[in-house]
Image: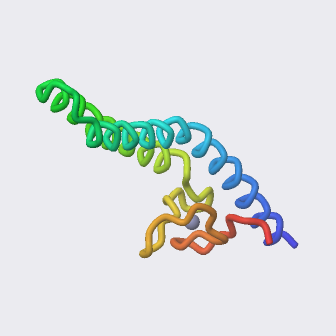
Amino acid sequence: MEDGFVQIDTVAEYQRRSKLASKYGYPFVVMTALSVIGLIVLMNVDSIDPVMRGNLFFAAVFGVFLSMIVFFLIQSKYNRCPNCEQTPITSRGAELDPAACPKCGARLRPY
Ligand SMILES: [Zn+2]
């Protein structure tokens, strides 16, 4: 019974953290998407000054990388297992909603 209580706590706490990670990470997902759209538009527009095009291209690539880096920093800050404080990333990569922590096995999602 006590064990059950501990598990429910890690679930509730992880769900809370994961919501925060999504809330703060969301604007940077949008920013990444907008930068990628900007890049695609740039590659399909011919009537643009080559120097201007180069600058915009650089800005869009920079935007993609910067927003992705900030997104992953936010994920690693908030998206942590409440039991062992590790980011629950498996060898196959990050799972959006892992059932249990791959590092310590603590339950992170309700049944
Ligand atoms: Zn853990």
**Scheme by which the image is coloured:** rainbow
Q: Indicate the position of residue 56 as horizontal and vertical percent values.
A: 24, 29
Q: Is residue 109 above or below residue 18?
A: below
Pick whichever, 42 or 36, lies toward us: 42
Q: Residue 110 appears in which quarter of the rendering? A: bottom right
Question: Which residue corresponds to the image point at 72% horizontal and 65% vertical from the top-left?
Answer: 109
90 and 6: which is toward the camera: 90
Image quarter hosting the C terminus: bottom right
Q: Position of residue 18 (x, y in %)?
A: 63, 51
Whether residue 18 sits left or right of residue 27 in the image: it is: right
Locate residue 93: give its quadrant. Answer: bottom left
Residue drawn at x 34%, y 38% is 41
| Residue depicted at 68% across the width and 64% down the height | 108
Image quarter for ligand 1: bottom right
111 sits to left or right of 87: right
The spot of residue 39 in percent (x, y) is 31, 40
When the figure is inspected, residue 100 is found, relative to residue 24, above or below; the finding is: below
Q: Identify which residue, 33 or 46, lies in the foreground.
A: 46
Q: Is residue 12 left or right of residue 98?
A: right
Identify the residue at image location x=43%, y=37%. Answer: 34
